[in-house]
Amino acid sequence: FAANMDLISINPEFNLYDSEWPIRTYQYQFPPGKTVWYEGKRVGETLNSLICDGTIVSGGHVERSLISPNVKINSYSEIKDSIIMNNCKIGRHTKIKNAIIDKNVIIPENYEIGYNLEEDKKKFTVTESGLVIIAKNQVLE
């Protein structure tokens, strides 16, 4: 978790933008990531974060997080200090902090992760440091 979060620091140990050390990897053929909506409190924004191709932050707020390819973050949602893996769908008014969410997870509207660790422990893995881990291919209710 810490190594991934270091990627969004000002001077990361492993600099993805170092032209002297190019990254050779397969890249998904998705369109560029984007933020949409700028209307009242419905503003799509990312702060100190990485968002990958195919991701849409549609009126949601992403802060100090890594968002993998093809993730949809719906309006009024907040994601902080988290890693969201490929193909996740985040419902409206959902709040997530200090979490790692694996691939293909669908989170409904008005859901909270990382704000009540006792409740989170009933459904997910929670580390000693309070990091909530959600396994892949789940549809949360």
Image (spheres, rainbow, N blue to C red):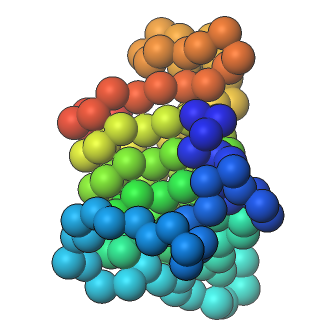
Percent x, y for residue 114? 63, 31
Decide: is 106 above or below 138.
below
Q: Is residue 21 visible?
A: yes
Coordinates of residue 108 in the picture (x, y in percent): 39, 47
The residue drawn where x is 78% and y is 61% is 11
Residue toward you, 113 or 132: 132
Residue 92 left/right relative to 79: left
Q: Nearer the viewer, residue 82 or 105?
A: 82
- Regarding residue 110, the answer to whether it shows in the image is no
Judge whether 23 appears above or below 107 on screen.
below
In the image, farthest residue toward the front: 20
- Across and down, in percent, residue 69 comes to 34, 64
Q: Residue furthest right?
A: 10
Point 64% across, 46% down: residue? 5
Viewed as shown, does residue 15 lie left or right of 123? right
Residue at point 41% right, 66% down? Answer: 23
Look at 55% across and 74% down and name the residue there.
20
Horizontal side of 51 relative to 14 (left or right) equals left
Frontmost residue, 31 versus 106: 31
Q: Give how far across and how far down residue 37 sits, in percent.
A: 56, 87
Foreground pick, 34 / 14 = 14
Quarter of the rendering occupied by the N terminus = top right
